[in-house]
Amino acid sequence: LFKELEARNRDLTATGEILQVISRSPTDVQPVFDTIAESSVRLCEAYDSALLLLDGQNLRVVAHDGPIPSITLIPVVRGTVGGRSVLERQPVHVEDVQAEVEAFPHASANARQFGFRTILSVPLLREGRAIGALQLRRTEVAACGRAVRRGAVGGPPANDVAGHGHGRRHRAVFERLHARPEAEPAAVPCGRL
């Protein structure tokens, strides 16, 4: 019971942090994205996190927290974990992506190049349509927790960021960003995820 209460407290703290940033930054979405990436690392006990938004046929990194380098554009294809989660509109969890050469050729090559093993990608949905993904990575082979895999990262419903009842500003942040897909993300260094 104590562990359940402790986990619930972490969830509420992370949600509170994100909502505080939203209230302080009603017109600037970058601090919100950064807070989501930072909170997801702590909440999910991941080594690395990236928030990606759909940009044509790619996912573009708009926020990152953690030391694992990567590419800033990920193609939306079944050979990438993020691409597959967006195409299938459901979480994709791969315990050892380096070993999954056939199922995820692009992701497996990136994992070997940049040194990560486990990856989870949860699509961000708006009205049932994928608009991006939240990715968590680890350098060791380790299953993500059951709560993370079922979508606790995005809260109920699992990943409907634009429809969740956290208020109009939360929805407005993603709607504003989605309305401007040509906008460049602020301060995303090339060659890092």
Image (cartoon, grey):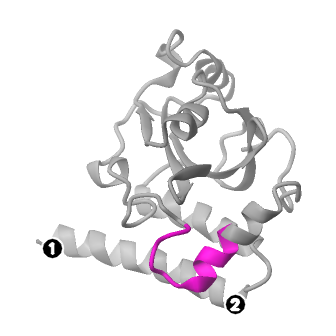
Quarter of the figure with the N terminus = bottom left
Q: Secondary structure at mark 2?
A: helix
| Residue at mark 2 to residue at mark 1: CA–CA distance | 33 Å
Horizontally, residue 66 falls left or right of residue 125, namely right
- State the image coordinates of residue 6 (x, y, percent, origin top left): 26, 73
Q: In the image, what residue occupies the spot 53% across and 65% down?
A: 161
**Location of residue 56 with respect to 148 vertically, above or below:** above
> Type of residue at label 2?
Arg
Q: In the image, what residue occupies the spot 65% across and 20% down?
A: 106
Q: In the image, what residue occupies the spot 15% across and 73% down?
A: 2
Residue toward you, 133 or 107: 133
- State the image coordinates of residue 27 (x, y, percent, origin top left): 79, 82
- State the image coordinates of residue 51 (x, y, percent, origin top left): 64, 54
> Type of residue at label 1?
Phe
Q: In the image, what residue occupies the spot 52% across and 9% down?
A: 102
- Magenta highlight on residue 181: no
Q: Secondary structure at mark 1?
A: helix
Crowding at label 2, few (<14), some or many (≥20) Cα neighbours within 10 Å?
few
The disc placed on residue 24 is 2
- Magenta highlight on residue 169: yes
**Location of residue 47 with respect to 111 vertically, above or below:** below
The disc placed on residue 160 is none
Quarter of the figure with the C terminus = top right
Crowding at label 1, few (<14), some or many (≥20) Cα neighbours within 10 Å?
few
How many numbered callouts? 2
- State the image coordinates of residue 38 (x, y, percent, origin top left): 59, 64
| Magenta residues, start to end | 162-174
Q: Residue furthest left?
A: 1
The disc placed on residue 2 is 1
